[in-house]
Amino acid sequence: MKSLTKTDYLLRETLRGLRRGGWMNWAAISTMTVLLFLFGVSLQASWQVEGLLNQFGSQLVISTYLESGVDASSLSGQVSKLPGVVNVEAVSKEQAWAELTADLGLSDVSNASAQLKGNPLVDELKVKARDAQEVPQLAETLKNMSGVNDVLYVSEVIQQLRELNQGLRWVSMTVVSLLSLTAVSVVTTTIRLIAIARRHEIEVMQLVGATRNWIYLPFLIQGAAFGIVGASGSWGLLLLAQKALKSIAASQQPAFIEFLVNGLQLTPRQGILLPLALVVLGTGIGLVGSVLAVKKVAAA
């Protein structure tokens, strides 16, 4: 019964403080909503780029050209045991020659071979890596193997995606940090004004023996409430943005919009992590702003 009375008191005092906050409550919540919405967008963009990196890493073929006279099948078993390798395809020089002449539109393969004095190609191993991070090291290992002449892979694409991901992270961190400072400032100002408006009530509570922690706990709950409401609003905006993009993609079907829609599809794990991250960040910022406000009021 005693715990229920305390909970009832905290809820009543929190609601009373929120009512006295007036339009400043909406300023704090709207600032928090914008911050968390941009944070959610940046987090989804980072997940999308990381997904592309993993996709390239799993589908990227490292073309390993062997020395003349070396049979691809003799090395395929050894290569398949290397760390980071998920699949190895041995391509004989005869198969490669047949594919090349077909691509060039040559119908008389024997004549082409005679003109070149035999098949000029070498056996090849097409090696698939597990993820993008392991590709450079795997390519270096393949290049140093006995019987390997050359190794080729699309390193530029992976490097550009990595640079893009790092750039997105730095921009996101900068924007989120600046908006977080703004949100903390707005929450601090809002809670401080509410506390000042209730200064006489606080003095009375101190006179009757209420502890400082008990007096100021409702203000901390108010700050956390700003973060939770802001997180809910930002999550709703993210869902509306996804729905709008899906609608545009369905009606006009531009390739870029369709790419965004596919990239913004959350996995079940991400569907839990994203709203949880929004709530944690919003609540944390709200609590920080509340603590700063309470310290300023208590020191006054």
Image (cartoon, grey):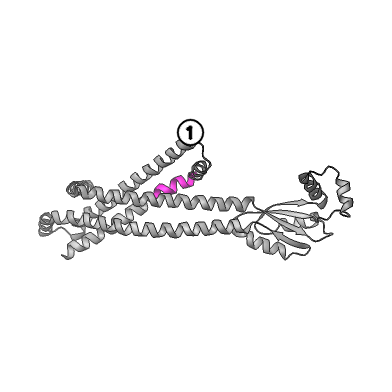
For image coordinates 18% across by 46% down, the residue present is 19
Residue 215 in the image: x percent, y percent?
Answer: 18, 56
Residue 262, compared with residue 300, is above or below; it is above
Q: Which of 151 and 249 is in front in this view?
A: 249
What kind of residue is marked 1?
A: Ser
Residue position for label 1: 251
In the image: residue 74, left or right of residue 291 = right
Q: Name the residue located 48 percent from the left edge and 46 percent from the top edge.
A: 269
Q: Which of 154 and 47 is in front in this view?
A: 154
Q: Residue at x 51, y 49 (%)?
A: 48
Can residue 225 be seen at all in this image of the molecule? no
Q: Quadrant of the C terminus?
A: bottom left
| Residue 267 is a magenta residue | yes
Measuring from the top left, give residue 267's x and y in whole percent. 50, 44
In the image, the segment drawn in magenta is 265-276
Q: Element type at marker 1? A: helix
Would you say residue 208 sits in the magenta stretch?
Answer: no
